[in-house]
Amino acid sequence: MKFSFPLRKMIAFICLLLVFTVQSSFLYEIVDIEMLFADSLQIVQTPDGQNMSGEDDTQYPKEIPGSNEAGTETNEAEEITEAETYTLEDVLSASHESNRKNKSSTVSGNESEKVQTENVLETLHKSDWNLILVNKQHPIPEDYAFTLGTIKGSMKCDERILGQLGQMMQAARADGVTLVIRSPYRNDTRQEYLFNRKIKNYIKKKMSYLEAFRASAQAVTIPGSSEHQIGLALDIVSDTYTMLEEGFADTDAGKWLADNSYRYGFILRYPKGKEDITGIEFEPWHFRYVDVPAATYMYQNQLSLEEFVQLLGE
């Protein structure tokens, strides 16, 4: 059947309009990130083993309409609610339970001065559990396993860091600073949700999918490559400043953490001026546990974790 020229033009226009509408509305919904970028970004999925399970599905839905929770590794300036923060009392309770079951072999914050003269480069190894490098180029190993300790409710972290986390929060309180934990361990589903939400936000700002993906990877760690997924990373804010933004660095809590967290085995994971090395923008609220000897060395020599592990043996 033949159509007249004007009719063919109208049919072609309608088809193009339909294609444009479908692409604009659903592109970011149907593209499989891992299939599209797996070769270049080495994206992997961590297994859902016994030690990696136990998240509350109601806390981590795939979509949270109207949610004001900002993700870690993101500079979104969104306030959090009281129910989303975890206090010193929560950590101490969890730490007491963990210590009751396991005798800690880590160095306490009060002993940090003793390790400053040790040759940590000879005594530590990049294969140590607390020094595992997880970033875009080094995804979480498929066989990586750990035990989660409960901070409160469904909120967890690697149970081996609870003792020193409690010590750090106690020391801060003694100095007049009240620290609260914003976001500890995240499962795979939660990290995927945060990353995809960031992409959608950029697409709404008229970016293409590729542009949105690249921009999102600078603010939110690609799923399978986040330290939150192994329970060693924490977003820490204060009772008077509850937003994940660079302004936290200028608060009393931000300054205290930057100057003292190493004494308890924590490092400022994404420092200012190291963006080209870490691949993530400056995040004064994001802290990673590495234990006191490594944290002290990195603090004294102003090294990122990426730089430090390059100095270590296997």
Image (cartoon, rainbow, N blue to C red):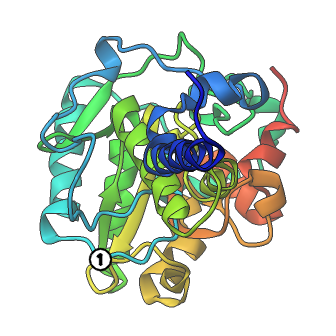
Question: Tag 1: Cα neighbours inside 10 Å, few (<14), some, or many (≥20)?
Answer: few
Q: Is residue 22 left or right of residue 276?
A: left
Instruction: Please report the residue visible at 30 percent of the width from the left and 29 percent of the height from the top.
Output: 148
Eyeballing the image, is 183 above or below 238?
A: above
Q: Quadrant of the N terminus?
A: top right
User: Tag 1: residue type?
Assistant: Glu
Q: Return the residue at label 1.
A: 79
Out of 167 and 14, give the one closest to the viewer: 14
Q: Secondary structure at mark 1?
A: loop
Eyeballing the image, is 45 above or below 107?
A: above
Instruction: Please report the residue visible at 49 percent of the width from the left and 77 percent of the height from the top.
Output: 245
Q: Position of residue 72 (x, y in %)?
A: 46, 57
Q: Position of residue 175 (x, y in %)?
A: 37, 83
Out of 42 and 179, give the one closest to the viewer: 42
- Numbered-mark total: 1
Q: Quadrant of the C terminus?
A: top right
Out of 135 and 258, give the one closest to the viewer: 135
Out of 184 and 190, give the one closest to the viewer: 190
Q: Position of residue 303 (x, y in %)?
A: 79, 57
Q: Is residue 306 left or right of residue 266?
A: right
Residue 187 visible in the displayed image: no
Eyeballing the image, is 241 above or below 86?
A: below
Residue 31 visible in the displayed image: yes
Instruction: Please report the residue visible at 62 percent of the width from the left and 48 percent of the height from the top.
Output: 9
